[in-house]
Image (tube, rainbow, N blue to C red):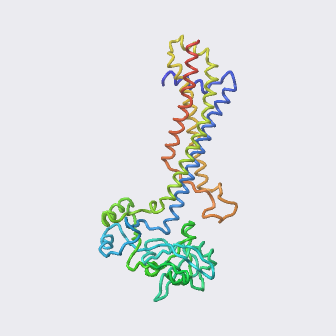
Amino acid sequence: MSFPFYIARRYLFARKSHHAINIISIISVLGIAVATMAMVCVLSIFNGFHGLVASLFTAFDPELKVLPIEGKTFVADEALEGKIKQLDCVEEFSASLEQRALARYNGRQAMVVLKGVDDNFSKITDISRILYGPGRFLLHADVMEFGIPGLRLANNLGMDADYIDPLLIYTPAAGARINLMAPDESFNLDELNSPGVVFSVGQKKYDQEYILCSLRFAQRMFDKDGEIGSLEIKLRYGTQTDKAKRLVQQAVGDKFRVVDRYEQQEDVFRIMKVEKYLAYIFLTFILFIACFNIVGSLSMLIIEKKKDVVTLRNLGATNRQIQQIFLFEGRIISLSGAIIGIILGLILCALQQQYGFLKLGDKTGAFIIDAYPVVVNPWDIVIIFATVVIVSFLVSWYPVRYISKQLTNNP
C-alpha cells in the first residue's frame, strides 16, 4: 500500500474536528451514488423498450428481406428464388408487394398500405400469434379475395373483425390521366372480403395503416403483373443472422440488398438510440454537478489538515505526495459512490423485472405492457462506471491540486 493512499484512507474514515466535513463527505458519496443509480436504471429502461419494440416487430417482419437497389419492384425470377432456396440457412421465403391505396367502407375512407403476400407468408412470420377474431388467416378462396386490416384501421373505418360489407380498394390506374368528369375511371377498383380476423402488432405504423391481401390481388390493383417488391426470408433455427445475411447477399448479387429486422425499422431504432444517448448526456451533466460536493469536502479537509501537512513535510514527504493524499481522498469518495450506485441500480432493476413496481399507467391493460421494461446491458455498466470515475477525477483534480499546492508552498 502506497504512503499517500494509506494516509488518504485514514483521513476519510477518521473523525474530523469539524463535524460538517463528515457530513459533506457522506453527501458527496450519496450524490454520486444517486446519480450513478439513476444512470443504471434509465439506460436499462431504454434497453427494455428497445427489446420490447424488437419483439413486437418480429411478429410481422421477416428475419431477412431482399430488396431491389434500383426501383421499388422487380420481376419474380425463378433462378433467383432457386439460389435462395439452395442455401442451408434458409427455411422458407415469401414474395410480397406493398404500396399505398385508398380504402373505403360504408362511407368512411382512409389511406392505407396494401401489402400483398403469397401463401408462404404464414410460414415465415408469427402472424397467427397477432390475429384476433372468430375467423382464421386466409388470403383467397377460388375467385374471392380476402383482406385482413390492422386493428386501429378497422376501428377507424367502423369495421368489426368479421365485417359483412365488402371493403373497397382504390389504386391509381397505370398511365391513366385524371378525368374530372368521371374520376372513378382513373382508378382501379376492387373489393376485399372478411376472413373473420384483424391483426394487431402493437405499433401504430402497422395497426393503423396496413391491410394484408393476396399477392395476385395487389399485383392486379397496382398493375404490376409478375412483379414483386421484396422476397421475405425465414432462417433455420439457430442460424446466425449476420452470417445468413452475408450468404444471401452473395447469392442474390449486387442488384439487390439484404436487410435484417433492425434495418427494416432503421428509423425507429435510430430514434431510440438517439434518445438513449441524450439521456446519458443529461445524466452525465447531473453527475458533473454532484461531483462538486467532492471539491467542497476536500477543500475543507485540506484546510483542517494544515498542521498535518507541515508534520508530513518535516518527516520527508514531498509536495507531490501531499497532493496525492488529497487526490486519493477524492478518488476513494468517487469510487465508493460509483460502486454503491451501481449496486443499488442493479437491485432496483432486478426488483422492477420481478415485481414491476413502476407502472406505465393507472389502469391494467392500458398499454402493451403494464410496467416499464428493464434490461441490464453489461457494457452499459462498464460505461457508467468509467464515466463516473473520469468525471469525478476531472472535477476534483484541478481544484485539489491548486489548493494543496498553495498550502504546501505557504506552510
Instruction: Please tell me which residue is depicted at 58% across the width and 55% down the height of the picture.
Output: 353
The location of residue 19, given as percent across then percent down, is: 70, 25
Q: Nearer the viewer, residue 8 or 115?
A: 115
Instruction: Please tell me which residue is depicted at 63% across the width and 64% down the height of the picture.
Output: 367
The location of residue 192, given as percent across then percent down, is: 53, 83
* Rendered position, 280 above or below 255: above
Instruction: Please tell me which residue is depicted at 63% across the width and 27% down the height of the picture.
Output: 297
The location of residue 345, given as percent across then percent down, is: 59, 46
Where residue 93 sits, quadrant-wise, is bottom left
The residue most toward the bottom is: 142
* Rendered position, 389 above or below 41: above
Q: Nearer the viewer, residue 347 or 148?
A: 148
* Rendered position, 398 above or below 172: above
Q: How many marks?
A: 0
Where residue 65 sits, quadrant-wise, is bottom left
Is residue 266 visible in the rendered structure shown here? yes
The residue most toward the top is: 314
Report whether 345 appears left or right of 93.
Answer: right
The location of residue 55, given as percent across then percent down, is: 51, 63
Is residue 195 visible in the rendered structure shown here? no
Where residue 229 sits, quadrant-wise, is bottom left
Q: Quadrant of the C terminus?
A: top right
Q: Nearer the viewer, residue 138 or 256?
A: 256
* Rendered position, 342 above or below 132: above
